[in-house]
């Protein structure tokens, strides 16, 4: 990158916030997919005026600009595929305002999700969206990826909590969307348009997020089953009994085995497939609902069912669940995480097909996910050189995707469409919708500088 360009960036944010060392460039080259492309420079603004000046400068110079939160994305969204500037928002991490009476918080984009949750919980308030990566992921990244999470069955997803945003356009203009009330409906819903746009339309600098009162009591239910199919049937039965646990997760015996090595998961769970559910609300209601979830699991053939209301015990179980992907990755040199969602009544059929595909291609596939939403992560585990297996992995991935689509499901339900999921275009997003998306991109970012190479592969 020309000295003139880095000098201008140093003038905007100060020399210590412009990083050019080989180590820093490498650290900002990839996300959790392992895909990577080096930026030419990393810039770490602290104020919205700095973001505005950087965006204006990059547009004038035609320099690619890729916003970045914690880099935990699972679709290559924060990988600077076009080179140029990696714009790290992590210094913009302040909670500007918590307003308990009006149930909202104003927070900067680089705030870590779990830290925001802890801060509002101290005021007896609750921000439910909880991607399993919440310990590191940022609010800006959650908005960029339209993050979901474990609790979305009862509480919804990131987009359901967005009241308004402060965004910076590629021109450098700072724009407010939405309002501090939930009933504002003036004009198009630009707030939610940003949600899932993966930094391709604008840079989010702060968000006004809806809060709800913190539930008084929580109960976790752990149920073990001889097979994943049995566990999936139980999850279907829980929902069809009219219950709405806040979380309803499923995992097969491979996932259970991986996570039980590092965590305090109940010994009775090993070798089984599991359902992990949580109920919450007023004490009596949460206890009653947990009893009913436990009964639905027992009636569906669970080999054992345990209930737990002790905070330390519950947190241990959820910590174990959140560690599944990392635990699988530790045990296998290569893990290929897929992401499919089917109508929740068809989850048993999807699981059966994944098992058939695994047998047919002689591949080891661990499956876990958010059963309550029909959202599964079949994860191909590879312990041989990947080049030897590439073609059968590719065929298995295509077959899993085709099955999900044929059941009326989707592929990109959780991880937004980045480099990895450009394949969704043409199957999930067909013309004329894809044409409209292209025109929207042009309206926001006519020079195509923001996160080029993503979504529609527009930009330079
Ligand atoms: C172990 C593990 C578990 C996970 N579990 C879940 C899960 O349960 N649910 C789920 O939805 N995801 C999950 N993810 C994926 C990922 O953590 C989420 O998508 C998360 O929202 C990404 O946040 P981030 O700050 O790391 O964003 P990054 O990876 O840095 O960026 C993600 C995208 O958002 C854009 N972006 C980032 N900040 C901004 C900004 N301020 N303005 C505009 N665009 C921006 C980037 O350009 C990129 O396209 C998981 C990942 C891992 C590694």
Image (tube, helix red, strand yellow):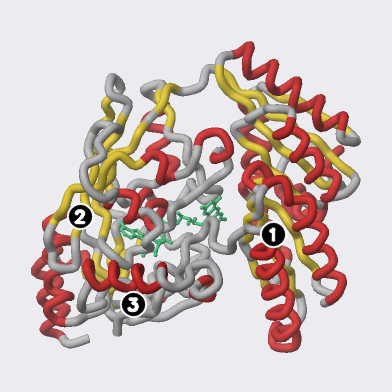
Residue sitting at 71 percent across and 49 percent down? 262
Q: Which mark is residue 310?
A: none
Q: Where is residue 163 in the image (x, y as percent from the top left)?
A: 30, 39
Residue sitting at 56 percent across and 20 percent down? 281
Residue sitting at 13 percent across and 68 percent down? 171
Q: Name the residue under label 1.
A: 407
Q: Quadrant of residue 162?
A: top left
Q: In which quarter of the image is residue 246?
A: top right
State how far apart marks 2 and 1 are (Cα).
46 Å
Going from the N terminus, do you reach mark 3 or mark 2 first? 2
Q: Mark 3 points at which residue?
A: 452
Q: Mark 2 points at which residue?
A: 46
Q: Nearer the viewer, mark 3 or mark 2?
A: 3
Q: Nearer the viewer, residue 239 or 260?
A: 239
Look at the picture and state if 347 lies above or below 119: below
Q: Which of marks 1 and 3 is in front?
A: 1
On the rendering, which quadrant does ligand 1 occupy?
bottom left
Look at the picture and state if 266 lies above or below 170: above
Q: Quadrant of residue 319?
A: top right
Going from the N terminus, do you reach mark 2 or mark 1 first? 2
Look at the picture and state if 9 lies above or below 100: below
Look at the picture and state if 320 lies above or below 168: above
> How many residues crowd mark 2 within 10 Å: few (<14), some (14–19), many (20+)?
many
The C terminus lies in quadrant? bottom left
Residue sitting at 86 percent across and 45 percent down? 230
Residue extending farthest top: 284
Residue 27 seen: no
State how far apart marks 3 and 2 are (Cα).
24 Å
């Amino acid at each position: 990158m020309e000295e003139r360009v880095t000098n201008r960036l140093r003038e905007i944010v100060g020399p210590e916030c412009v990083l050019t060392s080989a180590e820093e460039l490498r650290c900002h080259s990839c996300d959790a997919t392992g895909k990577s492309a080096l930026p030419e420079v990393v810039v770490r603004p602290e104020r919205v005026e700095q973001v505005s000046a950087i965006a204006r400068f990059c547009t004038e110079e035609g320099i690619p600009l890729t916003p970045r939160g914690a880099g935990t994305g699972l679709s290559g969204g924060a990988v600077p595929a076009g080179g140029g500037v990696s714009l790290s928002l992590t210094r913009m991490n302040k909670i500007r305002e918590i307003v308990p009476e009006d149930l909202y918080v104003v927070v900067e984009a680089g705030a870590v999700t779990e830290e925001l949750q802890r801060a509002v919980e101290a005021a007896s308030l609750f921000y439910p969206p909880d991607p399993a990566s919440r310990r590191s992921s940022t609010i800006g990244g959650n908005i960029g990826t339209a993050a979901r999470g474990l609790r979305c069955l009862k509480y919804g997803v990131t987009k359901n909590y967005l009241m308004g945003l402060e965004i910076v356009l590629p021109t450098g203009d700072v724009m407010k969307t939405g309002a501090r009330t939930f009933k504002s409906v003036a004009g198009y819903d630009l707030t939610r348009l940003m949600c899932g746009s993966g930094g391709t339309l604008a840079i989010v600098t702060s968000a006004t997020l809806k809060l709800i009162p913190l539930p008084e009591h929580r109960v976790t239910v752990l149920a073990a089953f001889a097979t994943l199919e049995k566990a999936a049937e139980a999850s279907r039965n829980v929902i069809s009994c009219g219950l709405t646990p806040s979380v309803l997760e499923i995992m097969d015996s491979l996932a259970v085995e991986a996570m039980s090595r590092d965590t305090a998961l109940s010994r009775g769970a090993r070798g089984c497939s599991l359902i992990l559910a949580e109920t919450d609300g007023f004490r009596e209601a949460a206890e009653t609902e947990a009893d009913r979830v436990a009964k639905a699991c027992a009636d569906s053939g669970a080999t054992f069912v345990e209930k737990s209301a002790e905070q330390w015990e519950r947190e241990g179980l959820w910590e174990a669940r959140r560690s599944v992907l990392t635990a699988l990755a530790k045990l296998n040199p290569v893990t290929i995480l897929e992401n499919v969602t089917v109508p929740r009544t068809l989850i048993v059929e999807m699981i059966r097909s994944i098992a058939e595909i695994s047998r047919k291609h002689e591949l080891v596939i661990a499956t876990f996910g958010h059963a309550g939403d029909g959202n599964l992560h079949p994860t191909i585990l590879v312990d041989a050189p990947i080049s030897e297996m590439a073609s059968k992995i590719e065929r298995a991935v295509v077959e899993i995707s085709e099955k999900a689509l044929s059941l009326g499901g989707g592929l990109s339900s959780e991880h937004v469409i980045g480099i990895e999921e450009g394949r969704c275009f043409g199957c999930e997003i067909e013309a004329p919708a894809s044409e409209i998306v292209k025109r929207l991109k042009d309206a926001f970012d006519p020079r195509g500088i923001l996160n080029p190479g993503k979504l529609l592969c527009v930009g330079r």
